[in-house]
Image (cartoon, grey):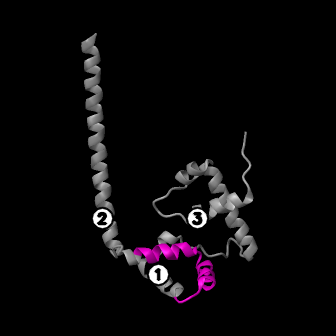
Amino acid sequence: MTAAFSTSFKQQAVKKAVGRGSDVTLISLADEWGINSSTLQRWIRESRVQTSKKTGHDSETMKIEKRPQDWSKDERLEMVIACGSLNEVGASALCREKGIYPYHVEQWKAGFVDGVSTKSKIDDRAEFKQLKAENKELKKELRRKEKALAETAALLVLQKK
């Protein structure tokens, strides 16, 4: 049996999914809401098609918008400063123009206030490479230990017989 979701639920789900942080996956959001991840992806696609029809943009001529997590620290800071001098309505309009939500600006502002590190992309890539290599090494070690544990368990079973 399929559940019928209201239009407002779909819109809220799409809004949250599009504006999610980089640490949240669509699958986890879909599980949280009790829907299939492919359904959520379809709603997002349909929302983008409807938005492009409303604004009169052709999909060929419409420029590809950056995701909020793709913005550089400098761009984020400029947006925080620009929205800081505007009232709520003006800030919302500017955010719509840039393809983001006002809460992204609030998150970025909080990040700057909390002192989120301002490492360069080069540092981030180097750290990512290091973490990836470390992760690979740990997985290799874990596989080795799992095999040893399985072998020991098999020997214990044989010893009991």
* Residue 9, picture quadrant: bottom right
Question: Which residue, as the protein is rendered here, is positioned at the far top?
Answer: 161
135 falls in the magenta region? no
Q: Which mark is residue 59?
A: none
Does residue 97 sit above or below 66 in this rendering? below
Q: Find disc 2 in the rendering and name its residue.
A: 127
Residue 53 is left or right of residue 122, and the answer is right
Front residue of 149/4: it is 4
Front residue of 160/56: it is 160
Horizontal and vertical percent position of residue 16:
59, 63
* Gap between marks 3 and 1 measured at Cα: 19 Å
Determine the residue positioned at 48% across, 71% down. 70
Magenta stretch secondary structure, dominant: helix
Task: Report the label total.
Answer: 3
**Residue density around tag 2, few if under 14, some if 14–19, many if 20 or more, within 10 Å:** few
Residue 87 is left or right of residue 7, and the answer is left
**Magenta-drawn segment:** 85-111
* Residue 151, picture quadrant: top left
- Identify residue type, mark 1: Glu
Q: Find disc 3 in the rendering and name its residue.
A: 18
- Identify the element where label 2 is drawn: helix
Residue 130 is left or right of residue 101, and the answer is left
Q: Earlier in the sequence, mark 3 or mark 1?
A: 3
* Gap between marks 2 and 3 measured at Cα: 27 Å
Q: Nearer the viewer, mark 2 or mark 3?
A: 3
Horizontal and vertical percent position of residue 80:
48, 82
- Quadrant where the N terminus lies? top right
Question: Which residue, as the protein is rendered here, is positioned at the far bottom?
Answer: 85
Q: Find disc 1 in the rendering and name its residue.
A: 75
Determine the residue positioned at 28% across, 47% down. 138
Q: Earlier in the sequence, mark 2 or mark 3?
A: 3
- Identify the element where label 1 is drawn: helix
